């Protein structure tokens, strides 16, 4: 089997939360969510080959020191979940090409897991249907189902109950990665501390105003309607984010907001040209910024080529 040169490649997009409402934790400690998920055109690429035993490596244009290389990596856990589901061993070498900031609130690890589920299912011809992959995705983490689905969706529950939303055109974003990392559980805990004993219930639904501005990609209407309940908690743990938020606003973004649990900061732009202008302004003040747009894509196989 080690002579097998077959390579199977899949990718999955990162996400942002255009709106993120967080309720008080349930008995299991998880927080119920009402969120507007949007996939962005920054995709992780996972290449799998047959190997004597499962192994993982990853490359990125930035420091990947914080990425676990062992069984605790979500991509490795995706293989373990498929092995348990199918009752077979799947010794696989996983190579991840990362572009999504690590521990940045953009679900990079979840994208790795979603792409791995799709690639390994194909590589070993397991034939697990999409519904089965979705259940495995749910067991791996709250954001993995959306990484599999992609596009745009309203998320409920832990973020794993999804209702797809169709888009008329793309929205443009400026992404400011951070050199620090924030742990998702720590940010949720900090939110609980900030809220004290006051129980917070979720709105029943996203407002019609928000949904129409979002679907129509009307950035000017959408900007004041964006919302992130985790932003204050992220700012408490990483106060320097206030400077980044101000810099993104000063550079001309329609709205600056922390992405998910942070510390990545988002800037909403009116068009590609406007996003590029904001990014150039940021770069001229020594703030590294990326430009991206929404994408209808989710996790998908890449066409195979000889290895
Ligand atoms: O599901 P995931 O592994 O991404 O969650 C990481 C941690 O974030 C959870 O263990 C939990 O502490 C926190 N979390 C939460 N409520 C959510 C999602 C995540 O409390 N809806």
Image (cartoon, rainbow, N blue to C red):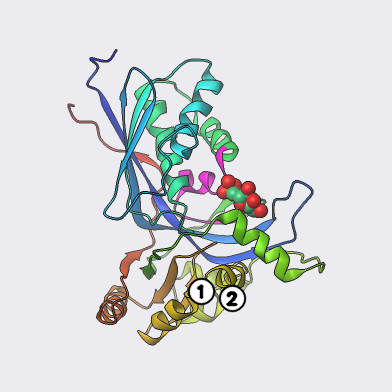
Residue most toward the left? 306
Residue 276 image point, x, y percent: 27, 75
Vertical placement of 112 versus 171: above or below?
Answer: above
Query: What residue is at 37 percent from the left and 40 percent from the top?
Result: 300
Q: Is residue 147 magenta?
A: yes
Tell me which corner region of the image, top left, top right, bottom left or bottom right, holds residue 198.
bottom right
Image disc number at residue 238 = none
Q: Is residue 21 magenta?
A: no
Residue most toward the front? 65
Residue 58 image point, x, y percent: 32, 41
Observer-nearest of 57 and 112: 57
Observer-nearest of 210 and 21: 21
Query: What residue is at 69 percent from the left and 55 percent from the top?
Result: 31
Circle 1: element type: helix
Query: What residue is at 39 percent from the left and 24 percent from the top?
Result: 54
Vertical placement of 211 versus 80: above or below?
Answer: below
Q: Quadrant of the C terminus?
A: top left
Observer-nearest of 189 and 5: 189
Q: Which residues are magenta?
A: 140-155
Image disc number at residue 213 = 1
Distance of label 1 from label 2 (alpha carbons): 6 Å
Residue 144 image point, x, y percent: 51, 44
What residue did someone put label 2 on?
209
């Amino acid at each position: 089997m080690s002579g097998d040169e077959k390579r199977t490649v899949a990718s999955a997009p990162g996400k942002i939360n255009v709106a993120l409402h967080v309720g008080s934790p349930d008995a299991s400690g998880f927080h119920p969510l009402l969120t507007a998920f949007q996939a962005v055109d920054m995709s992780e690429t996972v290449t799998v080959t047959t190997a004597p035993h499962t192994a993982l490596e990853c490359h990125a244009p930035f420091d990947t020191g914080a990425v676990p290389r062992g069984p605790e990596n979500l991509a490795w856990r995706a293989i373990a979940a498929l092995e348990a589901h199918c009752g077979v061993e799947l010794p696989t070498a996983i190579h991840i090409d990362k572009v999504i900031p690590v521990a940045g609130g953009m679900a990079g690890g979840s994208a790795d897991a979603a792409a791995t589920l799709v690639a390994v299912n194909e590589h070993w011809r397991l034939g697990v249907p999409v519904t089965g992959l979705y259940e495995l995705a749910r067991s791996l983490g709250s954001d993995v189902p959306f990484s599999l689905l992609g596009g745009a969706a309203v998320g409920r529950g832990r973020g794993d109950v999804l209702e797809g939303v169709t888009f008329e055109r793309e929205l443009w974003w400026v992404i400011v990665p951070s050199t620090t990392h924030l742990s998702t559980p720590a940010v949720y805990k900090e939110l609980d501390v900030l809220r004290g004993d006051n129980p917070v219930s979720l709105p029943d639904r996203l407002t019609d105003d928000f949904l129409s501005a979002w679907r129509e990609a009307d950035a000017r209407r959408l900007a004041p309607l964006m919302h992130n309940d985790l932003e204050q908690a992220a700012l408490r743990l990483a106060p320097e984010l206030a400077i980044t938020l101000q810099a993104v606003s000063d550079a001309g973004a329609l709205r600056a907001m922390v992405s998910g649990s942070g510390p990545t900061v988002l800037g909403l732009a009116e068009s590609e040209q406007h996003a590029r202008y904001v990014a150039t302004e940021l770069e001229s003040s020594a703030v590294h910024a990326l430009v991206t747009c929404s994408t209808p894509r989710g996790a998908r196989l890449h066409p195979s080529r000889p290895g």
